[in-house]
């Protein structure tokens, strides 16, 4: 979400929240972004929030079936280890490449919704009601 907002949002307030929440998000601590943007209880971000996980899980499953990435080696890593490092530990270099491809896909999935959110916030700030 933070990368999508940095790339596609025109709102400085959201970009500031992303600056604060980006480093914790690298260590799997999403709360500053989830509640600061907010993505929780936000009808605009509901669709990419739900479907990005479904799409990436499905693509990961398919990639494992066709042996693009190996199956997880079942090393238990703490939740606070950055995802790219977890990919190296569990899947090797192919897992890291796949992780960055999935990150790019999620950013592209969020892009239109970031723009819709910008428009809705601008409309709300200008005093118009959103029906």
Image (cartoon, rainbow, N blue to C red):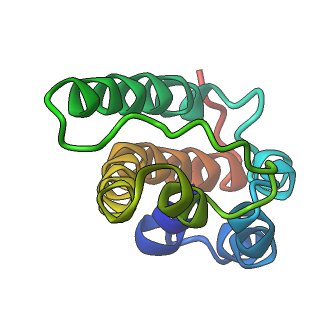
Check the image and name the residue furthest to the left: 66
**Residue drawn 66% across the image and 78% down it:** 12
Where the N terminus falls, by quadrant?
A: bottom right
**Residue drawn 74% across the image and 61% down it:** 81
**Residue drawn 75% across the image and 54% down it:** 28
Which residue is more in the foreground, 60 or 3?
A: 60
In the image, 17: left or right of 62? right
Q: Is residue 80 above or below residue 22?
A: above
Q: Is residue 90 above or below residue 128?
A: below
Q: Is residue 24 above or below residue 122?
A: below
Give the number of callouts.
0
Which residue is more in the foreground, 57 or 34?
A: 57
In the image, 112: left or right of 124? left
Q: Position of residue 91 (x, y in %)?
A: 42, 51
In the image, 114: left or right of 109? right
Where the C terminus falls, by quadrant?
A: top right
In the image, 83: left or right of 105? right
**Residue drawn 37% across the image and 54% down it:** 95
Q: Position of residue 129 (x, y in %)?
A: 66, 33
Which residue is more in the foreground, 112 or 3?
A: 3
Q: Position of residue 47 (x, y in %)?
A: 49, 25
Which residue is more in the foreground, 118 or 122?
A: 118
Q: Is residue 100 above or below residue 72?
A: below
Residue 54 falls in image quadrant: top left
Residue 59 falls in image quadrant: top left
């Amino acid at each position: 979400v933070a990368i999508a907002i940095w790339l596609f949002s025109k709102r400085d307030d959201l970009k500031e929240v992303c600056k604060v929440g980006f480093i914790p998000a690298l260590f799997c601590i999403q709360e500053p972004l989830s509640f600061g943007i907010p993505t929780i209880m936000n009808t605009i971000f509901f669709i990419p929030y739900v479907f990005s996980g479904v799409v990436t899980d499905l693509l990961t499953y398919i990639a494992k079936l066709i042996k693009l990435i190996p199956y997880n080696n079942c090393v238990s890593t703490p939740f606070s280890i950055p995802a790219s490092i977890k990919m190296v530990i569990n899947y090797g270099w192919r897992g890291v490449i796949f992780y960055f491809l999935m990150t790019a896909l999620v950013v592209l999935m969020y892009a239109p919704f970031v723009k819709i959110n910008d428009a809705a916030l601008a409309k709300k700030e200008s005093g118009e009601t959103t029906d």
